[in-house]
């Protein structure tokens, strides 16, 4: 007889079939036509069930083929390696959280609802915006949802983005807005500073004036350059009644101007920088936040948790503004999102609670010191910043020679350098997981090829 | 003994802690600090407002969130019979498996991540086999994102083929809300196909509705009533006769795993919810993971990138010819894909072939226990269900006033999560129950007894049931207060600003 730890009823099959009143399992499938039945099983799969021991061996055998890096990669491109305190992982692995689902039954799901309310509230403080939803998939889809919100609000079809925005997010945006026939128009950067050109911005905005649904800016941009003229850009956009959207690095909003201080309508982001693993690019955590404005709030996608009370006046939490969601409004819903990234939001709530005000500011300042130390030392060996603008943890570097060679050389030393941008440039990220020792070794290794 | 949930009256994290506390130490590199004292950012871009985050010790944070977890309920606590959600057991080995990708950066050189690419490649192949499709992409972070990908593929397909005026997407009236919502996001007009008295797609209505404006038909099979659409081959023929695309919403795949494949039924595009059928934990609402798969020329429209294998090397290089683009910023929810991978290894083809059967046995066993209970009714009572069953509590509601919602709340008091309620909309007072193959027979027995007990009590003393839940952290929630323009509170910031008189009612 067949046994399996995840199939407890195999040994009670006869008894259960008898209760149902059929002679065999096949009778339960008599409505499945014979010609569409599986006849030869799943041929491409391993045939036999593996024990845990064997599963681990199998996983190890595959993952041994990954290169063991000596240090966390010096890679950015939207997400960077960071240290995650154990308490974050421990809370995220609590069974009551991670094996539950959407809190449809609020009375028995108060813990999850409160944790989500706290997540929303922590992001609200970080961004200085009043309303945050309970999560979207990632930054790219959060941006797409923000643009679709704008389109529902004003019906227009052009979204202005900087040419320096993260290209992966741009591809997500392009895909998600294709169905509604929206169009992306790019604003070029100033090649010297790496910032968006205000001049060009005004021209392009003026050229498309009646069609612009939203303007999107990223802080910092894909090349790591900090935009210093966001105030001017958003003021200009508001003249044309475009919805203003800022994509913001959440970790650095502890020290640089958060979306709320620019008075933007919508902020989008990803929670990876504040407490989540890289996970080879997913799961991440899409963040979306708005000002206190009902036009915007009514168009928000996804779940929102609110504070309320129960019939005995105890403080309680529940899902609010549900008239926006797919299960009640179907094709008129603000989005189709259902399963979201709740557990990641809880992780971020724990992380922000642990670091708190002091920790987050200290961390941002420490990363700034490390990235600026790295760039200073790199400059000594002939590497230059590709742009003159300010930078935070990520920075585009000009090596003045074939970067492929440098990249390959680093790999032979077990070091993963930045993301190659073109023949001679690469985008680097330095964070609290890169010690002086690691940075120095990186630079020494680069020096070997620079000569 | 009665089951009781913890009730902590836990304050908000903002109301805890004290000035100057930290919950963790930030790594500080002394050597670098000696070299670089401070990085001055220009005044213009510096944050002006105070950062009003809490200040707590590590213990305070941990204890707070542990207490919150104790006021929550997952599969590891007890049965979660949410229909359409496939709340099966999440094997613990999955968590170890996921940790293998924790520190991998998505933009690493492919040479350095051959291991993870190999696993992704295998899952792509396995999902194609399981769905009966030709090629899969793992870009989609959840089912709804798969549907969006699917309808966009359908749109691009018709555009590429110069099929003009394809502006209608057909959706079954039993469909999940995501189907019409996704179709609308792709700019389609949604046309509902009514079910017949047997709870199946009405073939005559379908034939009348299909025309040269039909872009496609979104369907689950088994449908959301748990019934197998036995006319699926004819449905496929009708849709294909106008060059429409048949889309498979894979939320209900669990009931037929090992029995049939969507590809055999005539579907052209399929999404799989790895967090349902393949035991990826639901995470309190997510993250999920998925696969979006296609057959024939539709593979050319799949989202990119897809992992390819050349000379024993894996690359992320495949961009299908007419790809709709990217759905996720990187490659999808890979840590969850790895969880599903370990689950599949733990079953093998042999184990997987039992899933559809054993989940179907569990459902019909539960039906056998409940079908003669006064107060409940069942559409098409003589048909066997697959992964789930939808009872109507309308007879009970009519004679006692006790509704599906009340039954749900009373179940909470008995240590069960509730079924999905009021879905699908065509069943009044719907109780949608999916036991899954991982719930032991005794638990299904206890669940059936709990429902019977609740219904008996409802006939004797309906008020008692309407007062439930009593054993949970809080009692019934004030939804009006929660949503009222003057009291709606989505964040602590709103609470503070309202107290200061700085924000107005939300109109
Ligand atoms: C039938 C059906 N279709 C689609 C979905 C959407 O899937 P997801 O929640 O993974 O986005 C669900 C579940 O939520 C469902 O039950």
Image (cartoon, coloured by chain):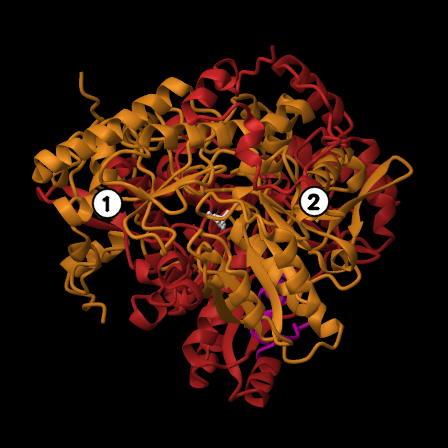
Chain colours: A red, B orange
Of the 4 image quadrants, the one containing the N terminus of chain A is top right
Vertically, is B195 above or below A21? below
Compared across the picture, whether A412 is left or right of B465 comes to: right
The x and y percentages for residue B394 are 24, 48
Q: Residue at position x 62%, y 64% from top?
A: B152
Q: Residue at position x 8%, y 40% from top?
A: B463
| Mark 2, residue position | A377
Label 2 neighbour load within 10 Å: few <14, some 14-19, many 20+: some
In reply to whether residue A192 is colored magenta, the answer given is yes
Vertically, is B453 above or below A363? above
The span shown in magenta is A169-198
Picture quadrant of residue A253: bottom left
The x and y percentages for residue A57 are 70, 17
The numbered disc on residue B155 is none
Of the 4 image quadrants, the one containing the C terminus of chain A is top right
Q: Is residue A389 visible?
A: no
Q: Which of B189 and A285 is in front in this view?
A: B189
Q: Is mark 2 on a helix, strand or loop?
A: helix
| Mark 1, residue position | B405
């Amino acid at each position: 007889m067949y046994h399996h730890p995840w199939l407890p009823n195999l040994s009670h099959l006869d008894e259960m079939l008898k209760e149902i009143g059929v002679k065999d399992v096949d009778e339960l499938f008599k409505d499945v036509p014979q010609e569409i039945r599986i006849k030869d099983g799943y041929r491409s799969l391993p045939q036999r069930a593996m024990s845990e021991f064997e599963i681990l061996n199998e996983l190890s055998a595959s993952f041994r083929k990954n290169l063991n890096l000596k240090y966390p990669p010096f890679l950015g491109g939207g997400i960077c390696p960071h240290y995650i305190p154990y308490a974050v992982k421990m809370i995220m692995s609590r069974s009551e959280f991670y094996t539950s689902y959407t809190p449809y039954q609020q009375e028995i799901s108060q813990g999850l609802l409160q944790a989500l309310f706290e997540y929303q509230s922590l992001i609200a403080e970080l961004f200085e915006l009043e309303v945050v939803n309970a999560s979207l998939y990632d930054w790219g889809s959060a941006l797409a949802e923000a643009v679709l919100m704008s389109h529902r609000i004003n019906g227009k079809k052009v979204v202005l983005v900087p040419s320096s925005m993260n290209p992966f997010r741009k591809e997500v945006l392009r895909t998600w807005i294709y169905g509604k026939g929206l169009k992306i128009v790019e604003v070029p950067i100033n090649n010297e500073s790496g910032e968006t050109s205000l001049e060009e911005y005004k021209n392009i905005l003026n050229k498309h004036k009646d069609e612009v649904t939203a303007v999107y800016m990223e802080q910092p941009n894909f090349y790591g350059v900090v935009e210093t003229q966001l105030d001017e850009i958003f003021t200009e956009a508001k003249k044309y009644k475009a919805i203003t959207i800022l994509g913001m690095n959440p970790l650095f909003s502890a020290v640089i101007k958060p979306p709320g201080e620019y008075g933007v309508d919508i902020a989008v982001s990803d929670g990876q920088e504040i407490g989540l693993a890289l996970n080879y690019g997913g799961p991440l955590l899409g963040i979306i936040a708005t000002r206190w404005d009902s036009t915007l709030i009514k168009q928000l996608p996804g779940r929102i948790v609110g504070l309320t009370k129960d019939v005995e006046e105890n403080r309680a939490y529940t899902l609010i503004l549900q008239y926006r969601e797919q299960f009640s409004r179907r094709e008129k819903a603000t989005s189709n999102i259902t399963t979201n990234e709740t557990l990641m939001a809880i992780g971020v709530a724990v992380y922000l609670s642990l670091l708190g005000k002091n920790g987050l500011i200290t961390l941002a300042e420490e990363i700034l010191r490390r990235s600026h130390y790295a760039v200073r030392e790199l400059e000594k060996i002939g590497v230059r910043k590709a742009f003159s603008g300010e930078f935070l943890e990520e920075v585009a570097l000009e090596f003045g020679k074939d970067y492929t060679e440098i990249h390959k050389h680093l790999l032979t030393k077990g070091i993963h350098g930045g993301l190659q941008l073109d023949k001679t440039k690469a985008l680097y990220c330095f964070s609290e997981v890169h010690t002086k020792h690691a940075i120095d070794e990186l630079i020494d290794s680069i020096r070997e090829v620079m000569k | 003994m009665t089951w009781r949930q913890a009730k902590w009256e836990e304050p908000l994290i903002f109301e805890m802690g004290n000035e100057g506390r930290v919950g963790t130490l930030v790594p500080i590199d002394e050597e670098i600090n000696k070299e670089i004292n401070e990085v001055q950012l220009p005044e213009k871009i510096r944050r002006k407002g105070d950062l009003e985050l809490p200040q707590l010790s590590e213990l305070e944070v941990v204890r707070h969130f542990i207490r919150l977890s104790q006021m929550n309920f997952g599969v590891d606590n007890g049965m979660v019979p949410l229909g359409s959600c496939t709340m099966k057991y999440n094997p613990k080995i999955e968590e170890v498996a996921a940790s293998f990708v924790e520190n991998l950066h998505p933009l690493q050189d492919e040479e350095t991540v051959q291991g993870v690419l190999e696993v992704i490649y295998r899952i792509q192949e396995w999902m194609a086999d399981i769905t009966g499709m030709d090629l899969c992409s793992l870009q989609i972070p959840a089912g709804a994102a798969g549907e969006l990908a699917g309808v966009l593929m359908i749109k691009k397909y018709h555009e590429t083929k110069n099929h003009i005026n394809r502006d209608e997407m057909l959706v079954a009236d039993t469909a999940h809300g995501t189907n019409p919502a996704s179709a609308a996001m792709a700019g389609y007009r949604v046309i509902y196909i009514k079910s017949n008295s047997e709870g199946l797609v009405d073939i005559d209505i379908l034939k009348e509705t299909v025309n040269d404006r039909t872009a496609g038909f979104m369907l689950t099979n088994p449908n959301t009533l748990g019934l197998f659409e036995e006319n699926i081959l004819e449905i496929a023929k009708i849709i294909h006769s106008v060059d429409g695309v048949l889309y498979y919403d894979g939320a209900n795949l669990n009931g037929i795993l090992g029995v049939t494949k969507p590809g055999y039924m005539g579907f052209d595009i399929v999404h799989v919810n790895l967090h349902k059928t393949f035991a990826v934990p639901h995470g309190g609402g997510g993250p999920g993971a998925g696969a979006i798969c296609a057959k024939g020329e539709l593979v050319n429209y799949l989202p990119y990138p897809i992992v390819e294998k050349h000379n024993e090397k894996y690359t992320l290089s495949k961009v299908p010819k007419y790809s709709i683009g990217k759905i996720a910023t990187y490659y999808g929810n890979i840590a969850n894909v790895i969880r599903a991978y370990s689950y599949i290894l733990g079953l093998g083809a042999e184990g997987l072939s039992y899933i559809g059967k054993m989940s179907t046995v569990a459902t019909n066993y539960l039906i056998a226990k409940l079908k003669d209970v006064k107060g409940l009714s069942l559409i098409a009572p003589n048909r066997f269900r697959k992964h789930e069953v939808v009872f109507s509590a309308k007879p009970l509601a009519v004679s006692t006033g006790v509704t599906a919602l009340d039954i749900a709340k009373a179940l909470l008091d008995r240590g069960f999560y509730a079924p999905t309620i009021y879905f699908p909309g065509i069943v009044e007072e719907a109780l949608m129950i999916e036991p899954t193959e991982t719930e032991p027979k005794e638990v299904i027995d206890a669940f059936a007894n709990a429902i019977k007990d609740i219904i008996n009590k409802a006939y004797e003393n309906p008020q008692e049931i309407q007062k439930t839940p009593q054993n949970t952290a809080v009692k019934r929630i004030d939804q009006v207060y929660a949503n009222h323009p003057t009291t709606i509170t989505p964040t602590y910031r709103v609470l503070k600003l309202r107290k200061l008189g700085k924000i107005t009612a939300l109109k």
